[in-house]
Image: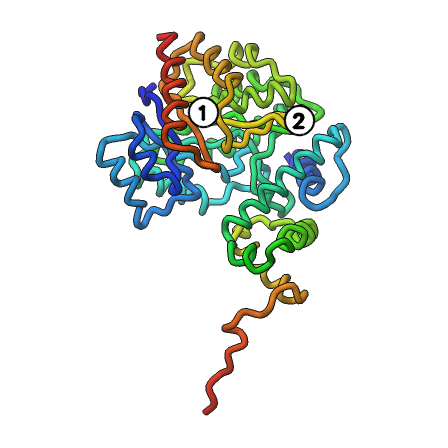
Amino acid sequence: MNRLGVGVGWRAEIDLTVEGLAVDFVEVLAENVPTDPLPESLRVLRGRGLPVVAHAVSLSLGGTDPVDPKRVAHLAAVADAVSAPLVSEHVAFTGAGGLDSGHLLPVPRTREALDVLVANVRAVRQDLPAPLALENIAALLDWPDSDLTEGQFLAELVDRTDCDLLIDVANLYANSVNLATDAARFLDEIPLERIAYVHVAGGVHHDGVYHDTHAHAVTPEVLDVLDQLCARVTPPGVLLERDDDYPADTELAGELSAIREIVERHV
Amino acid sequence: MSDLAGRQAALVRALLAGGPVPPGFDPARVHLEAAALHAKRRSVAQHLRPDLTDALGDRFRPLFDEWAGAHPRRSGVSFRADLETFATWLTANGHLRRRRWSRTRLPRN
């Protein structure tokens, strides 16, 4: 697996901040990035040789509707434009029955849902210029009839598709709070050697529920899950996601330092 | 596969269009997720259409909530196109004055 190091999500709102942070790679949200022309900031970062991963949120790989070829084509175009070493998308569906939720929804952890995911992943991957990593999501609700744990489900999915994993430790923490997912068992069940990189993000507790907002500071609990993961394997990359309520540059730098310290503690 | 399609559609109807909570789901969590999806959609609307938030002020939130509850976003309709429908609805229902350009008279021959 290619070493990526410690990175941050590139967003147009904080492009100058990202250019000034000490990071080894960045990730772009493909849906928000035009390719003609590519934002100048991304050309600057590419010019410095920084790897740029292309991340998608809207392919709905877990949906029973056919994946929209225009969305796949745009993701491929972004990946091409930034020479992405890696492309990533979520294990989720975003809509059904003619309606679009605009967000990531969990799929039931059943064989039937696995078959749908495997078929969609195989079809999509043919049109992508880089290896695809699949990400665990944060869910507020769970299906009533799941046969597999989340770890087993992901393990079988990447085994059948030969994809990599993007493990989001904030999503794992969220599910441990909201759905009673056993984070340690999850980490025991997934194939650690398939982890391409890791996501870290902030969130907030509200009325007994953890909301993965990407708009608050990274919590010690999320960093503890990162620590548990790094105790098992050194991930090739760890990326901080911040999508709203952008803090001072020094605060982002501090969160990146904390992440780097945890990764290096276990090397 | 068709069974999963129907079950996904039923869950999405419950989350976006006031449909019944499908059997076996925790109703409280379905309502929580529905509220989260709605809040995200409203946040995107505020981000993409500051002209509407400026024009409506305090009325933006109740009007958006009223419209969005009755008009879930259709697949294949972008957020921008969806919000254009909201703007049209606001005008048609008298919540927003017609835009200046639509009142401009055509030059006479």
Residue under label 2, please give it.
A142
Residue B75 visible from this viewpoint: yes
On-image quarter of the C terminus of chain A: top left
- Residue B17 lies left or right of residue A174; in this view the side is right
Q: Residue at x 55, y 10 (%)?
A: A184
Tell me the chain of label 1: A
Badge 2 element:
loop
Q: Could you tell me residue A234's position as x and y percent?
A: 38, 12
Q: Could you tell me residue A156's position as x and y percent?
A: 53, 19
User: How would you rate the neighbour count of disc 1 (Cα within 10 Å): few for under 14, some for 14-19, many for 20 or more?
Assistant: many
Q: CA distance from mark 1 to mark 2?
A: 22 Å
Q: Nearer the viewer, residue A196 or A226?
A: A226
Tell me the chain of label 2: A
Q: Nearer the viewer, residue A158 or B56?
A: B56
- Please name the colour scheme applied to the rendered image: rainbow
Residue under label 1, please give it.
A199
- Residue B99 lies left or right of residue A6; in this view the side is right
Residue type at mark 2 is Asp
Number of numbered callouts drawn: 2
Hey, which quadrant is residue A86 in on the image? top left
